[in-house]
Image (tube, rainbow, N blue to C red):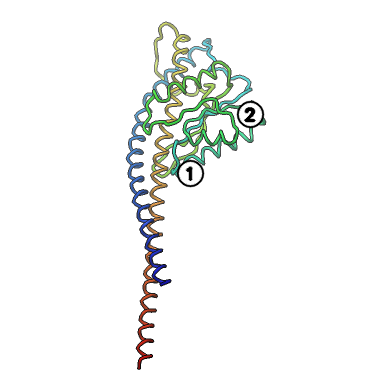
Amino acid sequence: MKSLASLRDIQKRIDSTSKTKQITKAMEMVSASKMSKAEENAKRFVPYSEKIQEVVASIASSNMDAVHPMLEKRDVKKTGYFVITSDRGLAGAYNSGVLKKLYETIQSRHQSTDEYTIIVVGRVGYEFFRKRGMPVAKSILGMSDQPNFNDIKDLASETVQMFVDEEIDELTIYYNHYKSAISQIVTSKQLLPLTDMEEKATASTSQYEYEPNQEQILKVLLPQYAESLIYGALLDGKASEHAARMTAMRNATDNANELIDDLTLSYNRARQAAITQEITEIIGGVAALE
């Protein structure tokens, strides 16, 4: 009876693991499809990003008299951190990697919560900072798997305005850069102030005529440029999220296969032992009758 009970337990575990494997395999396929589309979205955004960078850099470097808060480096009294995470887990180290890097940066740079504030995309990041009592100025939850600019426009615009209004004196973004389907790199970049316009302008030889004047155009283009950097990082981060989840689900499926193989081996051994025990008992019974 003990052997039969053991066999039933092993069979239940095999059935349960098989059902889990079906779920992880389906999630892997869904994430692969989302990753492909997100990667395409990120690539299609690159030409626009490069062109607006070229125009802004050309104007900012050619008109040294133009003044704009986003171009001015000032004493840092308060730092803003913009971090991109996901709303759901099951994505391997996608969230933990970027949150760990930002947390360590804050711990090493700041002595007080008055010295920084956080703008966060994604429920995982929001809950992480809230649980630790860290200041979250703005957040957006429930971001689409394939976001468009309208999904992030208000948050990006408000974040840039925080810098213009001197609520923060610098802004750094933390996200996962999509390198390939199996490689996502935790990345941090300073977004504001825009202090490298002259370097970016050296690669551009285009000549532009401006109306009404360069300074007025900068007032419009600079916020748009900063917002585009945030949106580009979001597209990059979403491609990374889907790739990380696809890889995590593939690993889970592989682990389930290995577990099923081990359980099947245990089942066969237990079954063989039960049969051997039955044969031994039959032989013993026959011997006793002789």
Q: Nearer the viewer, mark 2 or mark 1?
A: 2
Residue hosting label 1: 93
Q: Answer above or below: position of 152 versus 32.
A: above
Per the image, label 1 sits on a secondary structure element best described as loop
Residue 175: x percent and y percent? 48, 34
Q: Quadrant of the N terminus?
A: bottom left
Circle number at residue 113 = 2
Per the image, label 2 sits on a secondary structure element best described as helix
**Is residue 57 or residue 110 the one in the foreground?**
110
**Is residue 276 or residue 198 the one in the foreground?**
276
Q: Answer above or below: position of 57 versus 252.
A: above
Residue 51: x percent and y percent? 39, 22
Q: Quadrant of the C terminus?
A: bottom left
Query: Which amino acid, mark 2?
Result: Thr
Circle number at residue 289 = none
Task: Please tell me which residue is depicted at 44% across the width and 7% down the height of the picture.
Answer: 213
Q: Residue furthest right?
A: 111
Instruction: Locate residue 171: give its quadrant.
Output: top right
Work out how far the residue at label 2 is from the one at label 1, CA to CA, in angstroms. 26 Å
**Is residue 199 or residue 144 the one in the foreground?**
144
Q: Residue furthest bottom?
A: 290
Left or right, 155 with reference to 286: right
